[in-house]
Amino acid sequence: MKVQGACHCGDIHFEAEVDPAKVNLCNCTDCQVLTGSGFRVSVTVPSDTFQLNSGLPSIYIKTGDSGTQRAHAFCPRCGTPVYACAVTENPPSYTLRVGTLKQRAELAPQTRTWCRSALDWAQDVRTVPGRPKE
């Protein structure tokens, strides 16, 4: 599936080919902190399908408990997280942040990871009172 993505301010634009079966919802504490939310939804794509069309993201290197490093790319102007990848000149894949994708409504998570870190309140919000818009 061809997707187009952009940061909140529009400085960064990209496109890629994604497999909707590979959309993952991660509950790890890093994803909670890096998103400022209860989880992160991402999809990993092969590097040959990813194309950065405009803008230049800033990179933050995160070292996990395992010692593995990941480059987290975000817009230097608005701060939108865009993707993560291996810390190498030619990463084999990019993990795109589904919230940045124009087609996000079509990309429901198919798997969940780090469930031991899941926040109970973030697993089912259907009972939280809501308004159609603000």
Image: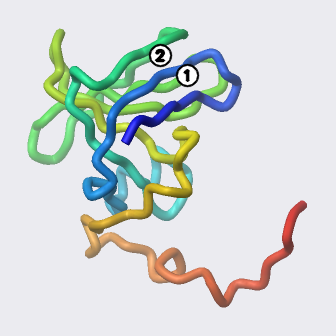
Instruction: Assign a secondary structure to mark 1.
Output: loop
Q: Quadrant of residue 129?
A: bottom right
Q: Residue at x 49, y 9 (%)?
A: 56
Asked if the residue under mark 1 is in contact with the one under mark 2, i.e. CB atoms within 8 Å, the reply is yes
Q: Image quadrant for the N terminus? A: top left
Question: CA separation, marks 2 and 1?
Answer: 5 Å
Q: Residue 77: x percent and y percent?
A: 65, 18
Which residue is outermost to the front? 1
Where is 37 relative to 83, above or below?
below
Q: Nearer the viewer, residue 2 or 90?
A: 2
| Numbered-mark total | 2
User: Most extreme residue toward the bottom, as rendered?
Assistant: 127
Q: Which image quarter: residue 51?
A: top left
Name the residue that disc number 2 marks: 57
User: Measured from the top left, where is residue 80 in percent x and y?
Assistant: 57, 32
The residue wearing badge 1 is 75
Residue at 27 percent across and 67 percent down: it is 111
Neighbour tally class for label 1: few under 14, some 14-19, many 20 plus, Cα within 10 Å: many
